[in-house]
Image (spheres, helix red, strand yellow):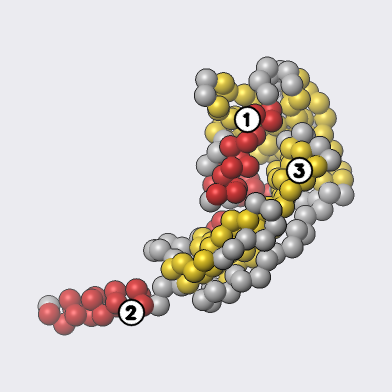
Amino acid sequence: MHLNIFTVLLFALFAEGHSLKCYQCTGLLGSCVKEEIKCSTGDAVCASQTTVQSIGDASQSMQIKSCTEPKTCVNGSLNLGITRTAITMQCCNTDFCNSRDTSDTSSKKPNEKQCYYCNKNRCFNKLSCAGTEDYCINAKANSDSMSMTLKGCASKSMCDVPSQITQVYTDVSCCQGNLCNSAKSITQNLLLLSWPFISYIMFH
């Protein structure tokens, strides 16, 4: 019995002493100032992420480094028509292996997919998807007392790892096939309610 307790304690000390160490930072204007952190239980890899947020013709790139779980290491984009968020991630499992910034590898080249998206009070606008956006998406966003439906294009990786989206939006569903996310009118402001997703990407 005493031997078993000793073995458990020894293993715990070993695991604590060998926790993965990563760089952590969030840079809203390109690069970011790195700090060293020790990953907590469940955080198995180091990640270096580039997020490009586009609104119309304007875009901004953000660098993010952190500990994360392997399942959240995805590359893809979410296109809501007026706004588009593209994520490029590189993950690794040795101490401080996420020192380098990642480069945006997303493509804006249109593919053959089309989905509905919402603009002002109209949700039957047709959107040409781009790059790896091979699914149509439906979601809801809430802000104060407002709730609205969001539609657009999404990469399969965004649908396969719903935590990338469901931390911010609710009732998320993806479908294949052109214009499979149906049309519906709404009345709220898309830019206002897409901000929570931008904030989540920036600070998590």
Cα separation, mark 2 vs mark 1, equals 46 Å
Q: Amino acid at mark 3?
A: Ser
Residue located beneath label 2 in the image? 14
Residue 156 visible somewhere in the drawing: yes
Mark 2 → mark 3, Cα distance in angstroms? 45 Å
The quadrant holding residue 137 is top right
Mark 2 or mark 1, which has the lower sequence index?
A: 2
Looking at the picture, does residue 41 appear above or below residue 85? Answer: below
Question: Is the residue marked by circle 3 packed among few (<14), some (14-19), or many (20+) residues within 10 Å?
Answer: some
The residue at the point 66 percent across, 70 percent down is 100
Q: Residue at x 77, y 55 (%)?
A: 106
Near-viewer residue (195 or 176): 195
Residue 193 tag number: 1
Residue 4 lies in quadrant: bottom left
Circle 1 Cα neighbour tier, 10 Å, few/some/many (<14 / 14–19 / ≥20): many
Q: Furthest residue to the bottom?
A: 3
| Residue at x 72%, y 45% (from the top left corner) | 53
Residue 25 image position (x, y, % from top left)? 56, 60
The 10 Å Cα crowd at callout 2, few under 14, some 14 to 19, many 20 or more, is few
Q: Please, what is the three-letter code of the amino acid marked with disc 1?
A: Leu
Foreground label between 2 and 1: 1
| Disc number for residue 54 | 3
Residue at 60% x, 70% y is 98
Front of the two marks 2 and 3 = 3
